[in-house]
Amino acid sequence: MAHLKPVPDLQPEPSGKAGGKPSIAELERYATVLRIHCVRMLAVAKSGHLDSSLSAADIVAALYYRVLRHDSSNQTWPERDRFVLSKGHAAPIQYAALAEHGYFPADDLMGLRQIGSHLQGHPDMTRTPGIEVSTGSLGQGLSMSVGICLALRLDGLDETAQVFTLMSDGDCQEGESWEGAMSAAHYGVSNLTAIVDYNHLQTDGTTEEVMDIGDVRAKFEAFGWDAVEIDGHDMGAIVESLERSSTLDRPAAIVCQTKKGRGVSFMEDRFGFHGKPPSQEQAEQAMEELEATYERQTKALRGNG
Amino acid sequence: MASELIEAAEPQSESIATRQAYGDALVALGETYPEVVALDADLAVSTQSMKFGKQFPERFFNVGAAEANMMSMSCGLAATGKVPYASTFAIFATSRSYDQVRLGIAHNGLKVRIGASHGGVSLGEDGASHQMIEDIALMRAMPRMQVVVPADYNQAYTAVIESYERFDGPMYMRFGRPKTPVVYDEIPETLGGGVDVLREGKDITLIATGHLVWRALEAAESLEHDDGVEAEVLNVSIVKPLHSETVLESLSKTGVGVTAEEHRVVGGLADAVRQLAAE
């Protein structure tokens, strides 16, 4: 990994503008940091899903840095919000967010997918701090989240603790996801938010070619959910819709139109990178681009400060 | 110390289905332990989980005909501190939702109890689509999954209470549809190591589980009466992990064993005993 430059050591910009919460511009820069982590991890691991992680980076940054009520020093805090990565193959982006929040040392990230590391190819609650449930077999995350919501309700915590589930195109092709959607509406679990990272690319081609999932927003709405569709790389829209979802009296779906490989020009919206790690040259180019983005975002933040 | 719930239970003496014990013991657990929840997939009257549902409607979730969803929901409930009893027919509890049970429940080592009724061919008229004779094999093959098959109502009651009070980790419990004779006069204090010697003998070991335990006892009677053969009868209530000592002791005494189960030979009790003997 000698060819990889270190991840920028982020000193959070003093904010206060969003009531102590990081601003939209800061969140955008955090997303870049998470992306840089992912490129480094995958370049070392030489296997895994980089493009699927990059498409979800903005959503995950908004969640971990602003929306989720979580505390790495008190991981069993009963009132905490829960995050379930139903698209478990995007584990690197969640691992990056967990490491940045102190759930485990950032050095652990370089062990991704290696024997002896706690960072499996897909999230594992029995190994990795901060993972609520093990996922990786698509379609299960939404159902698991409904179970979490019902347990929180029995404990009288459903008004405080929110459950956020990040789903993929593939999740929407699995029948079980719609069983989960049906049951969430039936039980009226209002503290559940499903976020769909709708990047339109899967292992064998575009979703339109392989198996068209069509209007996902309309499907959730038909199941009795509140459902909106946004640009999944528009940080303002992501934060707004996530924060709004917690105020609703029924389950909420946020369908995010995204681009696979977002943030790296040669991967963005291109077929053929699913489950493929970057080569050394690709990793270097990706790092250069992301570092340039980081510098630009930092300058803009200082300029605004 | 004996369980208060087991001591308080009413033993049955007439023929009665083991699934009845599942429903009755589940209610007793629910009254004592607030974290016990039950789920069913539109078979709550058949599995008897409805008894729990009527008593504790806020802790009962009928998910409709969506077994995969039920298993993953059980994972979420257990990960959040509840002890779910997920109930449906053996066929749907295993083959239909294997992936959900494997990753969400067994892999995570969560304390979820799968209450599978209508195991084996004795569910009868529904035919081959519902007659589950591979479930023990499927569940034995799954890492961390314990497999419990009680012999009668009275033992089934103990099994359900102990599934909460004594055992951790994931557990598959198999119950039957038809009324079957009781082989235990009382509600047993415990499942113990999971292998009971119900009758001693020196000539042959009959190793049975579930509904075939009373049949094995009948067979032992006629072997003695008709042929003068003294058969030892073992009831295996915990098929996995199989308590090796009792089985091997008996086999080395008699030198010959016959297994009896409502299941294919492949992967079932027969294979479990063969593996043990081979080792």
Image (tube, rainbow, N blue to C red):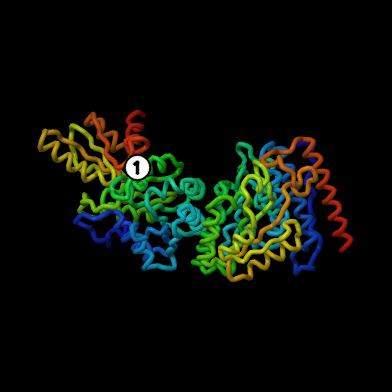
* Residue A24 image-quadrant placement: bottom right
Residue A110, placed above or below residue B155? above
Could you tell me which chain the residue with mark 1 belongs to?
B
* Residue at the image position 63 percent from the left and 57 percent from the top: A216
Left or right: B167 with respect to B15? Answer: right
Residue situated furthest right in the rendering = A303
- Front residue (pair A262, A132): A262
Figure quadrant of residue B132: top left
Please name the residue shown 26% across and 43% down the image: B235
Whole-percent x, y for residue B117 in the image: 34, 52
Q: Answer above or below: position of B278 versus B21.
A: above
Q: Determine the image quadrant of residue B86.
A: bottom left
Residue toward you, A169 or B12: A169
Residue A155 image position (x, y, % from top left): 50, 66
Q: Nearer the viewer, residue B270 or B188?
A: B270
Q: Quadrant of the N terminus of chain B?
A: bottom left
Above or below: residue B252 compared with residue A285: above
State left or right for residue B79 relative to residue A29: left
Q: Residue at x 35, y 38 (%)?
A: B268
User: Which sits in the foreground, A249 or A202?
Assistant: A202
A162 sits left or right of B27 in the view: right
Q: Which residue is mark 1?
A: B133
Q: Is residue A120 visible?
A: yes
**Which amino acid type is marked by label 1?**
Ile
Q: Can residue B244 be seen?
A: no
| Residue B267 horizontal/vertical position (percent) | 37, 37
Residue that appears at 23% across and 37% down: B206
Residue B56 percent coordinates (x, y): 40, 67
